[in-house]
Image (cartoon, rainbow, N blue to C red):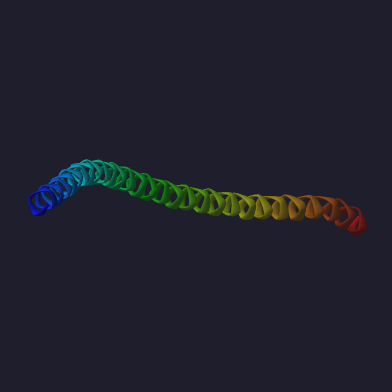
């Protein structure tokens, strides 16, 4: 019976169309979810990039501060060495002066 077969075919087509509609709806929901997650990840990535930039700037500032401290320390060491040399020279001169005084009398 051709009428029954047409009806069965139409029913199969309707079932397939209904299933396609469900799949399309599922796909839309999935797309919405993926889009939201991607936007969230993009925001998190931007935050990480900002934190990284701040950390790099902080590291550079710390490095510059350490270099300045090291340079100051080096200058202090040089000044201390000069003072120590002068002090040792002055003591050496003081110990040689009395010898010269006694040698001259």
Q: Nearer the viewer, residue 18 or 23?
A: 18
**Image position, residue 101 (x, y; %):** 86, 54
**Image position, residue 11 (x, y; %):** 14, 45
Q: Nearer the viewer, residue 79 or 8?
A: 8
**Image position, residue 42 (x, y; %):** 28, 47
Determine the residue positioned at 66% across, 55% down. Answer: 82
Residue lying furthest left in this view? 3
**Image position, residue 21 (x, y; %):** 15, 45
Q: Nearer the viewer, residue 20 or 84?
A: 20
Q: Which quadrant is home to the C terminus?
A: bottom right
Residue lying furthest front in this view? 1
Count of numbered tags: 0
Q: Is 70 on the left or on the right of 23, as rendered?
A: right
Q: Is 46 on the left or on the right of 93, as rendered?
A: left
Q: Nearer the viewer, residue 29 or 23?
A: 23
Determine the residue positioned at 34% across, 49% down. Answer: 49
């Amino acid at each position: 019976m051709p009428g029954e077969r047409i009806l069965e075919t139409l029913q199969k087509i309707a079932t397939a169309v209904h299933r396609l509609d469900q799949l399309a709806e599922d796909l839309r929901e999935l797309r919405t979810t993926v889009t939201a997650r991607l936007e969230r990840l993009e925001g998190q990535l931007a935050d990480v990039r900002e934190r990284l930039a701040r950390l790099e700037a902080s590291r550079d500032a710390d490095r510059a501060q350490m270099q300045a401290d090291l340079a100051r320390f080096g200058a202090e060491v040089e000044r201390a060495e000069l003072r120590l040399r002068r002090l040792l020279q002055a003591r050496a001169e003081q110990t040689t002066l009395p010898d010269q005084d006694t040698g001259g009398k």
